[in-house]
Amino acid sequence: MISFSSLSLREELTRAVSDMGFETPTPIQQKVIPQLLSQPSDIIGLAQTGTGKTAAFGLPLLHHTDVAQKHVQALVLSPTRELCMQIQEEFKKYGYYMRGLRTTAVYGGVPISGQIREVKAHPQVIVATPGRLIDLLERKALSLDQVKYVVLDEADEMLNMGFREDIEFILKNTPAREFTWLFSATMNNDVRNIAKRFMSKWQEFAVAKENVTNENIDHQYYVTNHHNRFETLRRLLDFAPGIYGIIFTRTKQDCQDIAEKLMKMGYHVSPLHGDMDQKMRSKVMERFKNKSLQCIVATDVAARGIDVNDITHVINYELPDDPEVYTHRSGRTARAGKSGICMSIVTPKEISGIRQVERLSKTRFHKSDIPDGAEIVRKKLFYYLEQIETAKPEADFAKIYQSIIHEKFEDMDKDELIRRLVWLQLKDTMEAYNESEDLNAGYEQRESRSRGNRSNVRLFINIGMKDGISNAEKLLHFITDSTDIEANIIDRITVRDLSSFFNVSGSAAEYIVQTLSAKKYKGRKIRIEEAEQRDRERGGFPTNRSFSRSNDGSGSRQGRGGSQKFNKRYNDK
């Protein structure tokens, strides 16, 4: 087995690696480091996050750095500030014993003046985000004319973020570049095009397949309707009272909104996304690492560079579009030989995405039921009892407060005291989940207790045939596209000239009314309300005409045969 001591690294690097406690290189390091030490060439390294890519290119890069030369010899490009800072910190550790070595990181979100001073102090290695590096080049604050090595780290992510032109500009402005080392989680067409344009006769080293699955991760998914997604997240957090994790969202706006809602409800969380300035992001990471926060709510880009080994849970608020991104996310937990849980909240439509990830990663997902209120209370009860059982109060605590406590409760029965203490811990949870509804989604929506156990509500909407809604299918498309409600909970659609009616499950009615009331259709403001309430006010009742669904649940203007195909198409989703 290869060890770091058996590699031909310069003595200063071997010593530093030993101090860091590293003995055996990871698979990507075993493949890449010997090649780059003995016969440097253009390479592509394909490996997932957490496989040791920084050392794979960092150690050879520093090995070839001439500390006697006071100019930039090596450049590392990375997509985010966090990853820049992380790589720079790792380089400092690797080069601890290399006297005369200077490395610096340049990235946006902080004043450029301080970074200008740093690059003018003649570093041999620069770690940079593309945008800030170009700012420095345009200000003529540094030159890349003598750069020999260029590393593109997380190349696929940089291209996804729109840095293609910046990367091309930077590579064109490294005229002395001899070697390009490209590291990426995936080898998509964009990455391959960059390689073809700027690399020659590269060698490819792939270990992604070996890291796709981690046997220590329990992959779970929970099926609910879209409008119940946040409430499902809240239940999952409450059902894991000792959670220390990351909640992933697709967009920065979702990240901010979800974090704010959770904070208002008393959860110790904070957002982490690209619109936050560097000072704030660093503060969030500091609080997360010292466990002042139980979770961070993050976008995929902002989470790049997070290096924490103790994460217990990863929660996908929504599945990512790319199955490879799922692997990145889930890989944040179960590090350093520990176990972890990756939870995904999906709608019935999105179950196919779970199957796709299973096929690509050869991972088995477990469908789990969303816990109800009673289960959450029991889970918190056992957690609290365990905390009491394992607590070890400091000796001084007993000396100072024992007599006060004893005097206060000497007349109270022990069991009564325990009941009161436990009640204080659980009462908020019990109140929050009193008469909580079932959030698990199936082909039929559960009845909503909060709406008087009505399984169906008929709604009126002020758009119809004269607005271009020529049949039930078009109205259904509009409703599902505007609200993300599943088609299978909508029934008995009636389309008229100026208005339409449809039935929906009771638990979804309020959400649909609130969501559609804020929208317009072809410039016309949507007005939607319960048909029963509207007809009481008008003194009449709605009647079904030729556009209503038939008694068997089918029916549209197309006739029975066409609508059966239509219903099947939606139910199969």
Image (cartoon, rainbow, N blue to C red):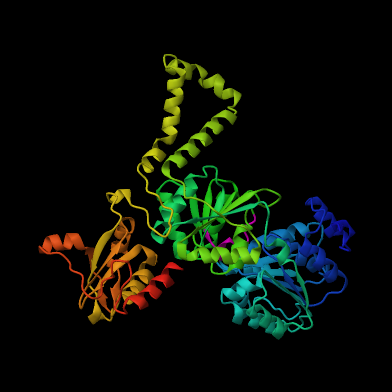
Horizontal placement of 222 versus 547: left or right? Answer: right
Task: Where is residue 25? Give x, y as percent.
Answer: 80, 58
The magenta stretch is 298-307
Who's the residue at 78% across and 79% down the image?
A: 202
Taking the magenta stretch, the answer to whether it contains residue 497 is no
Which residue is at a point 38% across and 43% down the rendered structure image?
433
The front one of 216 and 193 is 216
Residue sitting at x 71%, y 84% = 196
* Residue 300 colored in magenta in the image: yes
Left or right, 81 with respect to 499, comes to right
Establish if 288 lies above or below 46. above
Query: Along the line of sight, which residue is nearer the eye, 232 or 114?
Result: 232
Residue 328 shows up from this direction: yes
Which percent across, then down, holds residue 2? 86, 59
Quarter of the image for the N terminus: give it.
bottom right
Q: Exactly how many numbered labels are in the figure?
A: 0
Left or right placement of residue 462 versus residue 190 in this view: left
Residue 189 vs residue 37, the one in the foreground = 189
